[in-house]
Amino acid sequence: MTRHPLRPAIMEAERLLASAGVDSPRVDAELLAAHVLGVERSRLPLIPMVDPAVVDALHKVVRQRMTRVPLQHITGWAHLGGLDLEVGPGVFIPRPETELMLEWGLCTVDGADAPVVVDLCTGSGALALAAAHRLPHASVHAVERDPGALAWARRNAEARAAAGDTPITLHAGDVTAADVLSDLDGRVDLVLCNPPYVPDGTEVPPEVAEHDPRHAVFGGEDGLDVIRHVVGVAARLLKPGGHVAIEHDDTQGAIVPALLGARKVLTDVEDHPDLAWRSRFSTARRV
């Protein structure tokens, strides 16, 4: 059997993905090749030659990606906080920029003996599970209203517990409900939230428009329908000195801090940029 060089196959995959309008064709081509080969992306340079079946399999998944099926739906996982989490149709795909909010939040509870962490709008469970992975002595709670997303979160939670992480507590609930997690009022050290925040009518890429659940992306006319409730929930849950971090649209860098600052029990309100210096998440501390 004649073997084929891998590098030209990846270059052709990159060309095809670029022609289809994929934002990061080189990265996606390499990740798809690594997926087909069952190796880490960093090991691709160590595999100069591959069987024809590998080239065929790569071409197949590239064609799928060209239709703008999310990369994470093809590979079956997304990465956040050092974890690979299962994702697929029916659940929001965690984004790399959320790592910044996660790291900020974890720094606020660094050194705490047994912090209580809450992830509102958990989706796949990404933030909650990343927190539990990094904070083995923490008590982590996650809230999700959508049954489909909750099933993905439960699957990921079971996998992480089996891998040795401290189990999290999943709650089927709506963050807009007045009594959500009321048994934790005044007891929480850190509230994290990546809510639906894109204003209705905003043009989004096909990967988002056609594959992410709409209710996990869009947050009403101004994108703040859920965030307004989250601010109130956080103010109620946090104990004195506790912190909240809320991800938001890059057009909301003034209004979300204003919503936080309007709560008399919240102070030290700040807005934070992402790696492209776009406004990305807002934070505050309970007085």
Image (cartoon, helix red, strand yellow):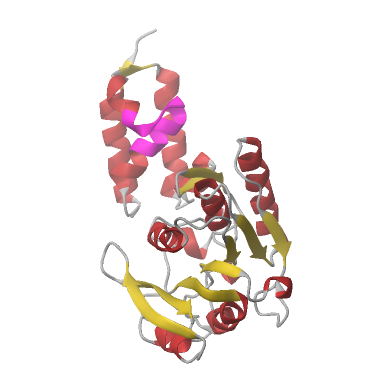
| Residue 271 seen in this snapshot | yes
Q: Picture coordinates of residue 10 (x, y %)?
A: 30, 33
Location of residue 215 with respect to 72 vertically, above or below: below
Marks counted in the figure total 0
Lateral position of residue 156 relative to residue 104, left or right: right
Task: Give the residues drawn in magenta, as a range.
Answer: 30-42
Lateral position of residue 281 relative to residue 144, left or right: left
| Residue 252 seen in this snapshot | no
Q: Picture coordinates of residue 286 (x, y %)?
A: 50, 79
Q: Picture coordinates of residue 185 (x, y %)?
A: 67, 76
Return the residue nearer the eye: 26 or 268: 268
Magenta stretch: includes residue 46: no
Residue 173 occupies which quadrant of the picture?
bottom right
Residue 44 occupies which quadrant of the picture?
top left
**Residue at x 35% of width, y 51% of height:** 20
Dominant secondary-structure state across the stretch colored magenta = helix
Q: Picture coordinates of residue 97 (x, y %)?
A: 38, 60
**Residue at x 64% of width, y 40% of height:** 159
**Residue at x 32% of width, y 43% of height:** 27
Quadrant in which the N terminus appears: top left
Location of residue 16 with respect to 145 vertically, above or below: above
**Residue at x 45% of width, y 53% of height:** 68
Q: Residue reaching furthest top?
A: 1
